[in-house]
Image (cartoon, rainbow, N blue to C red):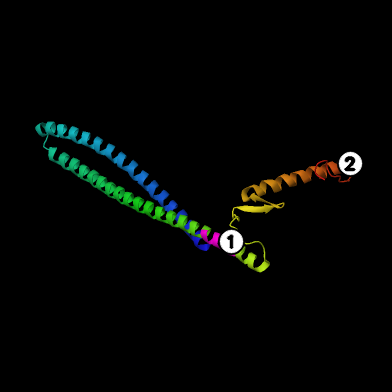
Amino acid sequence: MHDRDRRAEEVSLLEHRLSETSDNLKQSLAANTELSAKIARAEAERELAQGEAAEAKRLLEGERAERLRVAAKNATLKELVEKSNQKLSSSARELAALQVAKDEVEAELDKNYEDSEELLRQCFDRAVRQDHVLYGGAPASGNFDIDHEVYQGRLVPSDEVGALVAQEAQAAGTQEGEAEARGGVLRPRRGNA
């Protein structure tokens, strides 16, 4: 049981980390898109600046300073793009690794559940065999079903017992209400006596 809880916590932690990584990936993608737009704008600005620089070359000697400024700006933008690409690549690898780990944990949880269910069946069969030996009942015939419950002297699927008990409780509540209306005398209803 503790192992299952621990596994569930691990799955929850992995899902949380997967969500965080997914959010980081989305942020990186948004940043990359924004940087791509900035690069496109910067490229357009650079082309415009080059045109202006050519014009300025004829008119002014300061064209060289403008080229250096544009080149520095482009270098900075390219560096930012490279960093974003590296971060995006790292996030994608981490996301893939987390997904693999999550799949492994889920597979292990499924196996643990199946193993637990088999162990419960074996224990149930052992109890039936011991009952036969200890109390001398009819030989175990294989008619036993771990998914059924004895309710009012008959076998009923376990998942139906709760609904039957709730119906009886509701019927009992109705009888008590009728008794109060008759002055506190509880009389059985016809057909239920």
Q: Point out the frontmost of discs 1 and 2.
A: 1
Name the disc covering residue 124, or none.
Answer: 1
Name the disc covering residue 148, or none.
Answer: none
Give percent across and percent down for residue 7: 47, 58
Vertical arrangement, residue 68 with respect to residue 154, above or below: above
Is residue 39 left or right of 105 when viewed as pictured? left
Residue at image position (27%, 50%) is: 86
Name of the residue lying farthest toward the left: 58
The CA span between labels 1 and 2 is 49 Å
Q: Which residue is mark 2?
A: 182
Q: Is residue 125 visible?
A: yes
Which kind of residue does numbered mark 2 sit on?
Arg
Q: Main secondary structure of the magenta part?
A: helix
* Residue span colored magenta: 118-126
Which kind of residue does numbered mark 1 sit on?
Phe
Is residue 188 left or right of 96 when viewed as pictured? right
Residue at image position (72%, 44%) is: 167
Q: Is residue 62 visible?
A: no
